[in-house]
Image (tube, coloured by chain):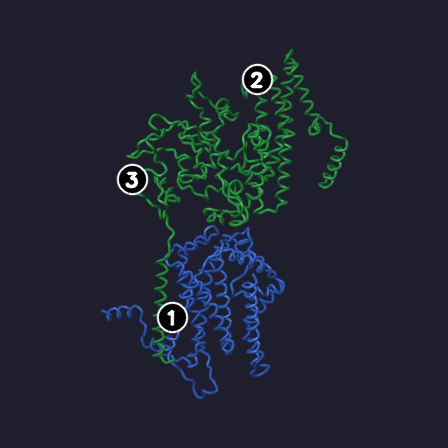
Chain colours: A green, B blue
Amino acid sequence: MLLETKKVVVSILSLFFLGSLLIVAWIEGGKQRVTAAPDAIVTAENRDCVDCHLVKSPGIVGQWQESKHSKSGIGCLQCHGAGEHDIDAYEHEGAVIATIVSPKDCSACHEKEYKEFQASHHADAGKILGSLDNVLAEVVQGFTVFTADGEKVQPSAAAVSGCLQCHGSEIKVLENGKLDPATWPNTGMGRLNPDGSKGSCSACHVRHSFSRAQARLPENCGRCHMGPDHPQLEVFNESKHGIAFAANRERYAEAMKEKEWVPGRDFEQGPTCSTCHMSATKTLPLTHDVGARISWTLRPPVSEKIDAAALKQGRTAKSWEDRRRDMRLVCTSCHGPEWVENFYIQYDNLVNLYNDKFGRPATQLFKNARAAGLFSNDVNFDDEIEFTYFFLWHHEGRRARHGAAMMGPDYTQWHGLYEVAHRFYHEFVPQLEEVIEHNKRLGGDKARQAHQVEQQLHDVLNSEMHRWFLGEMSEGERAARKRAAEEFRKRYAQ
Amino acid sequence: MSSSMTEWVNERAPVDPEVLKKFGSEPVPEHLKHWWWCLGGTPAYLFGVQAITGILLAFHYVPSADAAYESVVRINETVPFGWYIRSLHRWSSNFMIIAVVLHMLRVFFTGSYRKPRELNWFIGMGLLGVTLMFGFTGYSLIYEQLSYWGATVAGNITESVPLVGPSLANFIRGGGEVGSATLTRFFAFHIGVLPTLLIGLLLLHFTLIRLLGVTEFRFKKSAGSAKTFSFFPDHVLTEVLIGVTLMFLMTILAIVFPVGLAEKANPLVTPPHIKPEWYFYFTFRWLKLTSLTFAVLSLGLFGAVAAAWPLIDGAIRRRWKDSEASVWIGALVVLALLALTVWEAFVLHFSH
């Protein structure tokens, strides 16, 4: 190629190159950049709120800017705006607002979720005032002051900061529309709101970003569903589901923000709480009724099927079979039908074992002894045996059942039935025997009733499940256990 | 004003303009007008592109297992023109490897490695190795699934080298397995060790070219004294032409086929199909056809033979005068490597 030709070719190619750089610049100009708080729409009516709160409480505004609400122009007054006659309404900087945004307020746009939630067990979480747990919080641990007419004047701080933060307080509105500090702040699941609705959407959907991804996290449910009496979070973390989620949570982070996060379609392993208990699947719609797929109630001293209480009261409820069927549909997103079937057999067997061996006998003995007046039956928790019985069913008994329900074997075994057995044989039974002996020494009617309870205890301990404790194991079983123990010792040369 | 500036510079950097003129008008053999004789300058030019785009990328890249992938995402999505610089860097790396290989093939098939240029061939093999290592370390830094698992497989292969394998693998990885230590180490190699090595080898390479001159290459038609043309502006303009063409081509490729990002590395999830970059396809296929140890040893032997080829060719030609056995052997080897590469590419892209 001649030199002059080369110069021309270089010039033309350079022009082409510059042209391609212009295309690069054009593409760059069209690219959307990820920046903080991209497209929050502040409508005119919310402008003053945002401007002031940007200075006074910028975190709140920042949270809102992260939400989908802000992208749709749903701002402060759309949620906090109140009618002048609302019980909790007050005037604030020229606007009439209410602090509490109840599920009823959210139902203006989220009606389906509102209805499902109001029908759920979550919404009834605030109705614990008559429970033993409440007695503990208000009487045993705490101190509550009542007027002569039975009005609560000073609530128990233990309840306010403890139980009610999860279960929900009954919101009390003061004269100026402000909220009683004994009842708010509170985002408990079953909060009783001034407008009559139950619950708090922000119990799960942390305000003001109301993120789906955050609500789907197991830690979200674990705010309340954790601890010695209902360790669902701990059981989940122990389980394969929890391990699978932990291994993949970064990978799932973006997908979890989507409207639907369907197991088997959008992800292949590691479901969270919301997946099984609420999520849409390939065949089921999303539900905010968290009990809709649960077949047992593991809460009481003796577990029963979830619809049993409703049936006893003559109410209609979704049958436990239908709930289990729906849960199976979730399971089969990832598991084969035989796996699911066998799991439920194992789960049922464990619950029945707890019920038959410990739950029912302990409850019957406790109730009979109490009814017989062998220990005080007018005050809860003033006798050691009451705490013992409470621990047995309320703590380790629940742990064992939750462990089986959610495949956490260590919770089923060592934190569960092992501790149930120890509590039953080495605390409950000896304490009951002590109570019996004490009453026998008193003579008269007390002694007679003590003998009756003693006979009941004798019947329990001599039953097939418990006679090992009395050294009454059958010869056949004894021989089989001896053989197994010898083989074990040989194996480990002990 | 410009003459006083020139005077100021000349007093402090006394370069004789006559020397520059002489350098610029140095005669270059006529056959360098053929395109395939300009392939030596091309990888050097592309290294320059790599260095500039690499420095720009290094402003934003974070060599840590927790942050590497995210920093690349940021480069792609947030940093202005980051996607373009990254795509240029990737396409340029591919072209650099192609150019180095083509240049080596040109040198081989024109016998330009023969006495007295054997040393330059050895240096050239070193440059090829460094270029391939650039590609390997650079790709691993992204910390995608394939980067991670590719590096893991490479570590396992290294471990199987007899005697020194495990220590070598540990040294390269910064530990027993691929992780943050590997990334910092690869980053140090990629932006420090390898560029230093490359520049050093290039300087040696150019020095030897200057000392020995470019290989004379006469066709039967052109009898008599060899024709020449001037280095500047003629040959320089050829190199500029190649450079501008490459920039235009790579920009179009960056626009039409911008470099994306696969899934982030997950040590707990093995992808169903691990594959290296295309320039290692032939080794991958060879591994699959043979055993790990045999493949490692045979490929090592192949590399050693290739590096020592000037000596082997010299021995052959001493035995059989003017023998062109090297050409036939070279052609067979090239076909074999191509076949292995295409086979692996076909299996990876069409069977899965």
Quarter of the rendering occupied by the N terminus of chain B: bottom left
Q: Residues within 10 Å of mark 2 (few under 14, many from 20)?
A: some
Quarter of the rendering occupied by the C terminus of chain B: bottom right
Indicate which label's residue lies in the foreground, 1 or 3. Answer: 3
Q: Calculate the distance from the C-alpha at mark 1 to the C-alpha at mark 2.
A: 97 Å
Front residue of this view, candidates B238 and B120: B238
| Discs 1 and 2 carry the same chain letter | no
Q: Secondary structure at mark 3?
A: helix
**Residue positioned most to the bottom:** B224
Find residue A363 and report its horizontal and vertical position in percent. Answer: 61, 25
- Is residue A104 shown to the viewer in this render? yes
Front residue of this view, candidates A219 and B161: A219
Q: Residues within 10 Å of mark 3 (few under 14, many from 20)?
A: some
Circle number at residue A48 = 3
Q: Calculate the distance from the C-alpha at mark 1 to the C-alpha at mark 3.
A: 57 Å
Residue shown at 60%/64% (left/top)? B287
Left or right, residue B208 beside residue A486: left
Amino acid type indicated by mark 3: Asp
Find residue B274 and report its horizontal and vertical position in percent. Answer: 55, 59
Chain for numbered disc 2: A
The residue identified by callout 2 is A376
Q: Secondary structure at mark 1?
A: helix
Circle number at residue B244 = 1
Q: Residues within 10 Å of mark 1 (few under 14, many from 20)?
A: many
| Discs 3 and 2 carry the same chain letter | yes
| Discs 1 and 3 carry the same chain letter | no
Circle number at residue A18 = none
Amino acid type indicated by mark 2: Ser
Residue B123 higher or lower than A399, as above or below: below
Chain for numbered disc 1: B
Q: Tell me which numbered mark, 3 or 2, is placed earlier along the sequence.
A: 3
